Image (cartoon, helix red, strand yellow):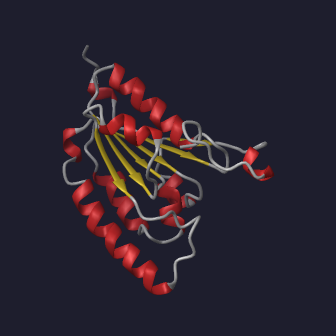
Amino acid sequence: MTTDKSQLGLVHIYTGEGKGKTSAGMGLIVRALGRGLRVKIIQLFKRNTGEQFFFENSGIKYLQFKPLHPYFKNYDEKELENLKREFLEFWNDAIRDIEEYDLLLIDEVGPGLNWEVIPEKLIFDLIENKPKNMELILTGRDFPNSIKEKANYVSEVKKIKHPYDKGTLAREGVEY
């Protein structure tokens, strides 16, 4: 199956406080794979996820930056500086081959920007300099307006109700 790749090249952002940002991005990945597109996934601040185990065993290019999510850990100043340095080393390696892909998903960019682990300039540069016909998906809460303005799609997932509010922790196979 061949897809007209000349129609590709837009930027998607899935953001908000509700559950489903990563799931929406992963759904788009499945759709793209079904149409024969070449896909790369970069997941930030997560580990031991169901999607990790699936994609690592499927031959899809899947990378993780695994430090604990800033939402769940209060990094002191020194730890935060080390995290920034580690991220930049990871980033430079992770995006070096993106011209080989039709679709790139980077999960949890929003929190990385919000916690200043990811410099905004990095994401601006990615959006401005990505391959012309590569679709780019960015996920996570707390995206700055400056980045949202650069996107073609911005979808906000709004939390109405969530079991976490009543003490139910993330469940394997559902939340991760």
Comparing 130 with 1, the one in front is 1
Up/down of 67 relative to 79, above or below: above
Q: Is residue 27 left or right of residue 83?
A: right
Percent coordinates x, y for residue 126 in the rendering: 33, 55
Up/down of 83 relative to 47, above or below: below
Of all residues, the one furthest to the bottom in this rendering is: 78
Please tell me how many numbered marks the rendered image carries.
0
Residue in view at x 78 percent, y 43 percent: 161
Q: Quadrant of residue 53?
A: top left
Comparing 68 with 32, the one in front is 68
Percent coordinates x, y for residue 65 in the rendering: 37, 58
Comparing 127 with 108, the one in front is 108
Up/down of 18 relative to 29, above or below: below
Q: Is residue 49 left or right of residue 56?
A: right
Q: Quadrant of residue 59?
A: top left
Residue in view at x 27 percent, y 28 percent: 6
Percent coordinates x, y for residue 139 in the rendering: 50, 48
